[in-house]
């Protein structure tokens, strides 16, 4: 198992609970949930990967089981990992998903590949 499938089911339920349309993409050895064609939230192994407003990053880093995403061994501003103990309760997971959804309209889309 490359990523926690139970957590993926919980994220799907949370996104549906917020009445959000989303797509799923397998990437970086995990799964990413795309909202409006932008990376919103994902799972890498056992951790929740969240894309949040960089202005709130320092505040959010004070929360349980939260750390800067350093997938490429370089910190990525606006991306955090939340370990399982930080999302074990549904209200905790929903809080993180809601933060991602709140930032999503301001987030930049990834570069699209040009058709040849």
Image (cartoon, rainbow, N blue to C red):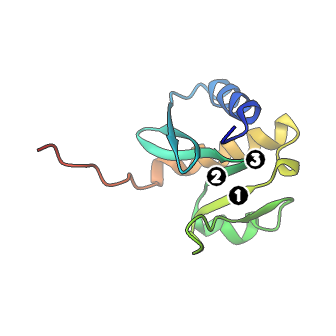
Q: Please determine whether, in this image, residue 68 is positioned above or below residue 38.
A: below
How far across and down, in percent of the image, does residue 65 sit?
A: 84, 59
How far across and down, in percent of the image, does residue 68 sit?
A: 68, 68
Compared across the picture, whether 61 is left or right of 49 comes to right
Query: Judging from the image, what secondary structure is the residue with disc 1 in?
Result: strand
How far across and down, in percent of the image, does residue 77 sit?
A: 57, 69
Compared across the picture, whether 94 is left or right of 111 comes to right
Q: Mark 2 sits on what residue? A: 50
CB contact under 8 Å: marks 2 and 1: yes
Q: Residue at x 54, y 51 (%)?
A: 28
Q: Please determine whether, in this image, residue 98 is positioned above or below residue 16.
A: below
Q: Mark 1 sits on what residue? A: 81
The CA distance from mark 2 to mark 1 is 6 Å
Label 2 neighbour load within 10 Å: few <14, some 14-19, many 20+: many
Query: Judging from the image, what secondary structure is the residue with disc 2 in?
Result: strand
Q: Residue at x 71, y 72 (%)?
A: 58
The CA distance from mark 1 to mark 3 is 10 Å
């Amino acid at each position: 198992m490359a990523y926690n499938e139970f957590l993926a089911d919980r994220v799907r339920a949370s996104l549906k609970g917020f009445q959000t349309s989303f797509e799923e993409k397998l990437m970086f050895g995990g799964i990413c949930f795309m909202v409006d064609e932008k990376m919103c939230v994902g799972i890498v192994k056992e951790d929740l990967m969240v894309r949040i407003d960089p202005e709130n990053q320092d505040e959010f880093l004070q929360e349980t089981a939260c750390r800067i995403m350093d997938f490429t061994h370089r910190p990525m501003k606006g991306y955090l990992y939340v370990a399982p103990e930080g999302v074990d309760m549904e209200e905790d997971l929903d809080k993180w998903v809601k933060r991602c959804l709140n930032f999503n309209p301001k987030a930049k889309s990834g570069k699209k590949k040009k058709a040849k």
